[in-house]
Image: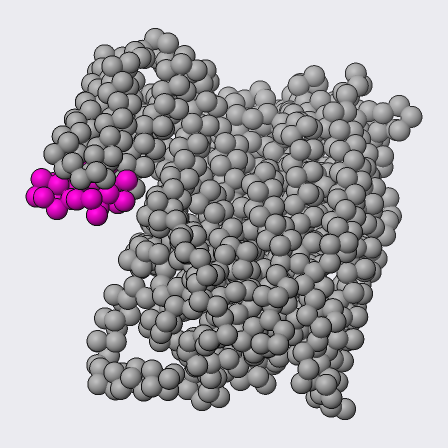
Amino acid sequence: MSAIASPLPKTPVAWKLPHRGKIGMASLIFAESAIFTIFVVAYLFYVGKSLTGPTPREVLETPIFYTICLLSSSLTIHFAGKFLERGRRGAFLSLWLLTIVLGGLFMYGTGQEWHRLIYEHGLTISTNLFGTTYYSLVGLHAFHVTAGLVMLSIVLLFGLANRVGTEQSARVEVLSLYWHFVDAVWVIVFTVVYVLGR
Amino acid sequence: MTNKRKTEWKAVAARVTGILVILTGVLLAARLCVASPPGDHPIPSIFDPRSTPAESIRHLSYFVLGITGVIFLVVFSLLSYVVMRFRNRVADSNREPAQVYGSTQIELAWTIIPILIVVVLFLATARVIHAIQDAPKPEEAVEVTAIGHQFWWEFRYPRLGIVTANELHVPVSDPAHPTPTFLKLLSADTDHSFWIPQLAGKTDLIPNHPNGTWLDPHETGLFLGQCAQYCGTQHAKMLLRVYVDSPEDFNAWVRGQQDPANRDEKEAAGRHVFESTACLNCHAITGTNGTGRFGPDLTHLMSRHTLASGAAENTHDNLRLWIQNPDAIKPGSLMPAMKLSDADLGALVRYLETLR
Amino acid sequence: MSSDVMAIQSADAAGRSWTEVLHEWVTTVDHKRLGVLYILYALFFLVVGGIEATIIRIQLMHPHNDFVSPQVFNRMFTMHGTTMIFFVAMPIMFGFANYLVPLMIGARDMAFPRLNAFSFWLMAFGGILLYFSLLGANGLYGAGNAPDVGWWAYAPLTSRAFSPGHSTDYWTIALLVSGFGSIGTAVNIIATILCMRCPGMTLGRMPLLAWLNLIMAGMVILAMSPLTAAQVMLSIDRYLGGHFFDTQAGGSATLWMHFFWIFGHPEVYVLVIPAFAFASEIIPVFSRKPIFGYPVMVGATACIGFVSMSVWAHHMFTIGMNSYANSFFAITTMAVGVPTGIKIFNWLGTMWGGKIQFKTPMLFCTGFLFQFLIAGLTGIMLGAAPFNWQLSGSYFVVAHFHYVIVGGILFALFGAIYYWYPKITGRILNESLGKLHFWLFLIGFHLTFDVMHIPGVLGMPRRIYTYEPGRGWDTMNFLVSIGAFVQGIATLVFVANLIISYFKGAKAGNDPWDAWTLEWSVSSPPPAYNFASVPTVASRRPLWDLKHPEDPDSRYE
């Protein structure tokens, strides 16, 4: 026999299990958090241990503006998702685009900072322990932001081609979970690098 | 005998055979651990300690082995009983046995008892950890700095002004007036580990991470060990020889090591070879231009019984071979083949043989 | 019904060329096919890893042997460890999880079938990349050849200074790539179990195999990532001039050790927990009783999962941590023995009062119980830090962990293969060959790994390509090597059984073992869609309820 026969009761109550996209993304976020934790631990372990070269205090400038950009993008993506659920595609698209712009601004800020650090202060990944840990940690985060921006842009393109509607809001929400994660990681990285590490 | 019976007896037979193998092995090992005559310690067994740290560890091991042995016997008896008593008999194979889902009391019991055992084990362990690691260093302690290299040991006695290699000399320690040896452990390249089982547990030598260990041997003689952390191609031949000397012998050895290099004018040609080839880039001999630290200090080369960190006996032929073709003795070691002419090699070896 | 399904499938098969079949298998996203691919991949590398072990054991049969050079030997033990952990044990556990979990929870496939396929191919590519290193041209010492830095790749041995060339990079990148595959599979397992159970199957009614694989997947998520991070750091050091582990620039060699073992210790629990899962399914069926203490089995395993993330530095007792750190790791290590011991008692409790049938799967599970007990006890011994100071890095440790992995995990795996082979292929493995396999392997295993404890106690370190005669190690090493050959022969018997039974084995039918979980309700092999209609369950043993309507489990749970 290949099916269970009758003696077992048919579904007595509604059988509702969590959405697999959200669980999958949550699991991925746990894995990524573990990776970031290791880089943060390495950063904190090596604070003050560089044998030579520029120190954080000498060269770091706190990126307040770009941090505000990135953190507000969490708000915009959140509301974009809410609008999509309610079927307001225009509002969804505008806020989604704003999210991408804010994320892009953050990346621009990171690039600008790295340019300054490399060309004005001579700090590279191979200069000293601070250089190694700084570029690795901030770079890992920037890599995740970039990956997120690529995915957001793909959704934007689909949205502009009128293929994103209320039916896709669960998937869009899975993607915004990722984006919130990226922002939360920035809060940690910011605290560790620009507050504690100095 | 039915097939089922045969299977049952086979299952028991397997268990019993396993136990016998283990017991035989243990007895064999124990026989090997029986105290060898003094001065001769060829078997570096952790159950044949001659120094306080190793003795504390053996003491703890017996305690732990005792407890785990009892646990093993209890569980093994249960398993054997279950395998014999509850195997399926042909007669009543149609009815399923009583379907028991669990028992809170039993499960509680077999949770609480292991927790108590763990607490006891841990307290015993913590006591020994502290006793060994936090032991204070007395004034009379001999201080040695051990530096691990690929694939040899550098030993310096800073207070005595001695630099030597591979063969460590320490004084015997009288429990009434202890003269332990405290070693500072450093590394010049990769990770190594200092392990003389009969004298102490091992401690690693890690670059940029100074470590320490100590030993207080109660008996004279030669104790064997070797590097215990994989450090590259010739990790296997980074051997250790610890000579525990009587106080007189130790002092004599120290004086010998403190003397400058023997300067025998008969072998000036050989010394010239040493000073004019690449030898002196890696090796030091006091009184010559050789101050290299990459390889062992050769000032008192002939006071050592072995070459290449124990890989070969210190004989004329081996010394020649080691200089001319080290890969024949220790392939992958960092000693290059010196490619000397026969005449140069002969002179050099004769010179080195004067370095007592 | 099932014969119709089989007829349809074989009618399909008749008209297809081998290229079509190959294409189907390479592009499959079906969890059963991917499971089989994982298992076959792992069994192939089991043989490769076994050959590496045989080379090691031949070299060590006599002191000062010259069967292989030190360089080759060092590559052998590095490749043996890396292969066995990453390309045998991990894939085979993922393979079984892939095959069994959807069937056991009444689902049609995993949550993300395409991610499933992608993860498999990532892992497969990693293994091939690692072995491609053997083909790299011989050049400078260390250039373009198999890695020889040990499977833990300790810094600074792995820096450019001490490992020139690319062999270390093959190790790093192969594992990085397959690590991403592992994380993908773990995400898939978690999403499948949490989101795709059939109606009525609450978490408390899942088979233990599903629970244990859920815990295993959670551990992979948390533990694989530190290795990935450390390998990225190592690559930054080697190629971008970074200083993470560069001791000359103030970097720390012990930092690598911490990161590696934060991965390394949970990793071995990742390997053993699925073995527990097999035992927890097989022992009840062959004892004819339900598992004793299901809730505690789940709780104890979750406990093991958590506590095992706090024991990692028991691999580092000799690196010079202070006495407080050493004491902390000693107690956590001993503590993790408590839930593990509880599980052994629960298995014994399952067998107690049962009607045990010693077919081959049960023989292997009984061996697993006996050997895992011993392995766990030597582990507790090694958790006593001072004892560890003597025996870390010695053959005692090698004996201990092989006792766990071969005596425990591999035995449970053999049991699982004999148990589920009928479901996967539709034929039963030959019972006489199975028993021969068991007894030969048991004798070889004990000859090798019981005896191996002794040279460790007598001072023999590990990872040495030869040793000095006269230290009491000679005869022991000889016996250990003989045991290895016996295990090799037993493995050949096993492989022969796998092949012969595939063509000539007795037809299995749906439920050859009279078992109780959902996979035994479908045909052997199952149809591509698993279940014609999604089942509904009311207890932990739905088939027991069907076979014993007068006394269903649902009345007692």
Q: Quadrant of the N terminus of chain C?
A: bottom left
Where is residue C191? Give x, y as percent.
39, 52
Q: Residue at x 44, y 81 (%)?
A: A1
Q: Residue furthest bottom?
A: B1
Q: Quadrant of residue B253?
A: top right
Where is residue A111? Give x, y as percent.
21, 22
Q: Quadrant of the C terminus of chain C?
A: bottom right
Q: Residue furthest top?
A: A58
Where is residue C97? Give x, y as percent.
45, 61
Q: Residue at x 73, y 38 (%)?
A: C386
Q: Which residues are magenta?
A: A144-173
Task: Indicate left or right for B99 with C19 as reference.
Answer: right
- Looking at the picture, does residue C85 appear above or below residue C223? below
Is C99 covered by the magenta stretch? no
Q: How many marks?
A: 0
Q: Quadrant of residue C316?
A: top right
Nearest to the observer: residue B280 or residue A167 = A167
| Residue C73 shows up from this direction | no
